[in-house]
Image (cartoon, helix red, strand yellow):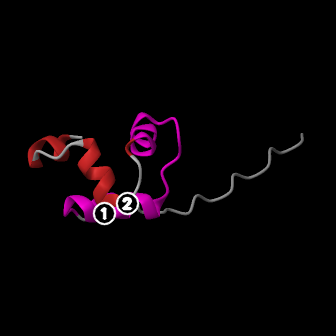
Amino acid sequence: MDELERQGITLAELARRMGIKQPTLCGMLRGSSNMTLKTMARMALALGCTLKAPRLVLVEEAAPPSRS
């Protein structure tokens, strides 16, 4: 939301740039509907930003508890 304010873009304008309806965008930003990575990329493109993907780190499986 900070980037919207910085650029002076309304939610309606962002939704238009993304090709989605404003209520859909509002639901995603509120957390009441899931946002896919593809949608995040469309939002970044609409704002002229880049999207950094999170780094995935393999977590080793915990050893099963020993039976004594």
Amino acid carrying label 1: it is Leu
Q: Residue 14's spot in the image, x, y percent? A: 27, 51
Which secondary structure is most common in the magenta stretch? helix
Task: Looking at the picture, tell me which residue is in the foreground, 58 or 26.
Answer: 26
Which callout, 1 or 2, points to the residue nearer the camera?
2
Looking at the picture, does residue 30 appear above or below residue 10?
above
Q: Is residue 36 left or right of residue 6?
A: right
Question: Mark 1 or mark 2, which has the lower sequence index?
Answer: 2
Q: Residue at the location (40% across, 45% down)?
A: 25
Which quadrant holds the N terminus?
top left
Q: Residue at the location (27% across, 43% down)?
A: 11
| Range shown magenta | 23-49
Amino acid carrying label 2: it is Gly
Looking at the picture, does residue 7 appear above or below residue 2?
below
Query: For numbered disc 1, what is the local secondary structure?
Result: loop
Q: Residue at the location (45% across, 64% down)?
A: 38
Q: Is residue 36 left or right of residue 44?
A: right
Between the residue at mark 1 and the residue at mark 2, the CA separation in whole angstroms equals 18 Å
Q: Return the mark for residue 8.
A: none
* Quarter of image, res 8: top left
Dot 1: within a 10 Å radius of its alpha carbon, few (fewer than 14), some, or many (20 or more) residues?
A: few
Task: Looking at the picture, tell me which residue is in the foreground, 25 or 64.
Answer: 25
Inspect the magenta stretch and tell me whether residue 31 lies in it: yes
Which residue position is annotated with label 2?
A: 19
Q: Residue 36's spot in the image, x, y percent? A: 49, 57
Which residue position is annotated with label 1?
A: 51
Q: Residue 20's spot in the image, x, y percent? A: 41, 54
Q: Residue 3's spot in the image, x, y percent? A: 17, 47
Asked if labels 2 and 1 touch by Cβ distance under 8 angstroms, the answer is no
